[in-house]
Every structure is written in structure tokens, then in C-alpha cells.
Image: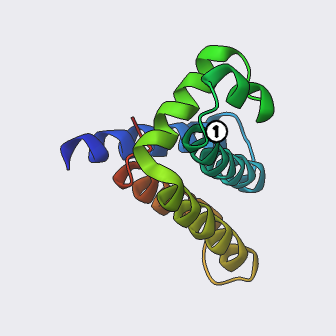
């Protein structure tokens, strides 16, 4: 939908800024996205077990607390299964790019679209 398109566009712009303006390499950006997806999976599971937001943030080493609350909000929206699927997708895209089956930048852009469509962009 329109919200997903806007979210994807914002995420893609941030990735481009990191790559083009800040001169970052795609590998650590991909790693950060994979780590976020991993944290989303765990946050979703922990929330289902009844843990409070502060405990989840502390366990996942997400600081400061407002950042943890944002991750938990996205985890609730995406769900554990959706986050696990996104985690698999980013790892597969990374492996393909490293194996010469795609470009790292393009893989990151495509992942941004998938992440936003899953509900993770807001």
C-alpha cells in the first residue's frame, strides 16, 4: 500500500545515504538489518511470553528504552513468523550477493521494500 511505499522509499534513501554520502560498505549495513530482524524475532517471542518492554530491551541490549519500544512495536506488527521470514530473506540476499549472484546495493533496496511491506517500515 501507500504507507509501505513511503516507508520503503525512506528506508532506501537512508541506505543510499549510508552508501553514497557516508561511504559505508553494504556488508555492515546488511549485518545491521539482519541483526534487527533477529531482534524482532526474539522481541516478538519474549512479548508473547509476557515479558515487559524494559526487560525485552535489556535482554536484547537495545538502548535507550525508546529505541527498544520502537523495536517491540515493529515486532508486534510484523510478528515472530514475519520477522523470521525477513531474517531468512536478508541472510539469503547477503549470501547471494557475496556469491556473485546479485549486487549488495540492489539486495539491500529489495529488502527495504520487503521489510516495509511486512509492516516493519513504520
- For residue 40, above or below residue 86: above
State the residue at coordinates (50%, 61%): 81
Q: Residue at x 30, y 40 (%)?
A: 6
Between 16 and 6, the one nearer to me in the picture: 6
Q: Please name the residue that numbered disc 1 is placed on.
A: 18
Residue 11 drawn above or below residue 38: above
Comparing 81 with 110, the one in front is 81
Q: Residue 114, image x and y in percent?
A: 42, 59
Q: Quadrant of residue 17?
A: top right
Going by the picture, which residue comes out furthest to the front? 50
Residue 46 lies left or right of residue 79; in this view the side is: right
User: Is 62 situated left or right of 107 in this image?
Assistant: right
For the residue pair 29 and 17, the one nearer the viewer reads as 29
Binning the other alpha carbons within 10 Å of mark 1 as few (below 14), some (14 to 19) or many (20 upward) gives: some
Quarter-wise, where is residue 69 in the image?
Answer: top right
Q: Measured from the top left, where is residue 80 in percent x and y?
A: 53, 54
Amino acid at each position: 500500500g501507500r504507507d509501505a511505499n513511503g516507508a520503503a522509499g525512506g528506508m532506501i534513501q537512508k541506505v543510499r545515504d549510508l552508501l553514497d554520502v557516508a561511504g559505508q560498505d553494504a556488508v555492515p549495513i546488511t549485518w545491521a538489518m539482519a541483526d534487527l530482524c533477529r531482534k524482532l524475532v526474539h522481541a516478538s517471542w519474549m512479548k508473547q511470553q509476557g515479558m515487559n518492554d524494559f526487560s525485552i530491551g535489556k535482554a536484547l541490549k537495545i538502548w535507550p528504552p525508546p529505541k527498544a519500544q520502537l523495536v517491540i512495536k515493529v515486532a508486534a506488527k510484523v510478528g515472530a513468523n514475519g520477522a523470521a521470514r525477513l531474517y531468512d530473506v536478508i541472510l539469503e540476499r547477503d549470501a547471494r550477493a557475496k556469491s556473485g549472484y546479485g549486487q549488495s546495493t540492489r539486495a539491500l533496496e529489495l529488502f527495504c521494500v520487503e521489510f516495509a511491506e511486512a509492516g516493519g517500515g513504520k
